[in-house]
Image (tube, rainbow, N blue to C red):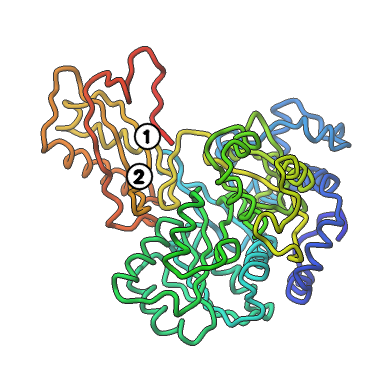
Amino acid sequence: MSNSLTPPSDNVFNHFIFTPLDTLLAEHQADNSEARVLALFHRCVAEVPAYRKFLQSRGVNPAEITSFAAFRELPLMGKADYMQAYPLPERCLGGSLRGADRVAVSSGSTGQPTFWPRSVAYELDVALRFEQVFHDSFRAHEHSTLAVVCFALGNWVGGLYTTSCCWHLANKGYPLMVATPGNNKAEIFRVVRELAPHFEQTVLLGYPPFVKDVIDAGIAEGIDWTRFNPKLVFAGEVFSEEWRSLMGQRIGSVSPCFDSASLYGTADGGVLGNETPLSIAIRRWLAEHPVAARSLFGESRLPTLVQYDPASRFFEMHEGTLVVSGENSVPLVRYHIADKGGVIAYDEMWDFLKGQGVASPGELGLDNEESLRHLPFVYVFGRADFTVSYYGANIYPENVTVGLEQPGIIEWTSGKFVLETRETEDGDKFLHIAVELLPGIEPNDAMGPVIAASIRAQLLRLNSEFANYTPVERQLPQISLRSFADVEYFPLGVKHRYTRR
């Protein structure tokens, strides 16, 4: 694979379809990712009108960007100052939507959608991430597989993107059938009961809390998941290794590093990285060694840890957050995705582990002969802004504010609140909102339900992701009423934060 960037063609499809995974990844690793991302920059200067204007507004002369060191000095593009500042066609390659044949939508903080056009050919890099999971973890090239897409269907990125990538794998020759019930549990159960017995394994793909809901509700309805050799693919949220183990127990998993995998993806960049047996094994070891985890990540909480392909999505760090570059219909050049996290080279990771006394994959519970992907790691704590992720939907404080500003409620509350997701002892997630009452207002039993209903109504109205991703029975938040200047949630003299993780 050369460093030059050429428009997608039938040759790209044929190369993906007829080239084994090992060869594709070897080609990418042989590529010079720094030279490739520099070539992407120059292509965007030539072909993306918005990017030329963006650079001009910041006094950048593109002709001076001739090295990777110079590339790293380029201004970061963001959603507000780039994606929302220039017309959509001008952000596309060629300055037109004609090169794109599909579109995904993500919700903004005010409910104003952001559209992400792309070409089906650009899905192949993402399909490669799915192929890593289905090949390396699930051995789906050797076993007949039913893939059940449990992400919401529609314009949102998860469902149709996942479906399309799985179809690419089936077209490549994987013995794979793709079913698309979406986030409709009754349809999921009908698909599983009717089709799963005809396959050697069944893969459920969805947001972690919804997949848990499906598994738990299925058990309640008499589905014996262990009969179907289930595998799980997650995206959208960070979860604990204890939660993974809980899910494994409920589906009869005996190989936690191979029976599930999480994808790190965004609407703007597609799937940016994926868990591998190695990354899961490392994360599970770190979960049992919190001092080592804090030394590696700098925090006591455990982030999602995935491996990524720098020839496909090129990561950098900026002040503790992630920056990504990648070719797409709307190409990203040093795009600040506002996720808190970092990058660790493959050898750097092993140097760290060896320093902790872990000298081989066998000491992580993996077969020493297991083929390891020598790809770098990226870790993600979640959004660095004030959003809360719930069933894969980004919940914004601005949406909650509107719910508190309704007549009959605004007379009770100060407008301050704390939004967070919590988890029951059984591992079920729910949305919790602590609401500050005005001075002199005493709580009563009628207030909480009224506030909860108002916030839910505004979330459904303003946030299409919440409306379409979150199961109806999980949409009503739990409200706790707090007195004015409550020490735990609303201390005086401290800058208030509207979210808590």
Which residue is pictured at 20% across the width and 21% down the height?
438
Which residue is label 1 attached to? Answer: 398
Q: Write the residue at 56% across / 57% down.
A: 262
Q: Secondary structure at mark 2?
A: helix
Query: Relative to the observer, which residue lies in front, 223 or 437?
Result: 223
> Looking at the picture, does residue 159 appear above or below residue 500?
below
User: Which amino acid, by three-letter code, is at mark 1?
Assistant: Glu
Residue 177: percent from left, percent from top:
54, 80
Image location (x, y in percent) of residue 385: 50, 33
Choose the circle earlier in sequence order: 2 or 1.
1
* 293 lies above or below 202: above
Rendered-image quadrant of the N terminus: bottom right
Crowding at mark 2 (Cα within 10 Å: few <14, some 14-19, many 20+):
many
Q: Position of residue 200 (x, y in %)?
A: 54, 82
User: As drawn, which residue projects farthest toward the bottom?
Assistant: 198
Q: Which mark is residue 356?
A: none
Could you tell me if residue 212 is visible in this image?
yes
CB under 8 Å between callouts 2 and 1? yes
The residue singled out by tag 2 in the image is: 462
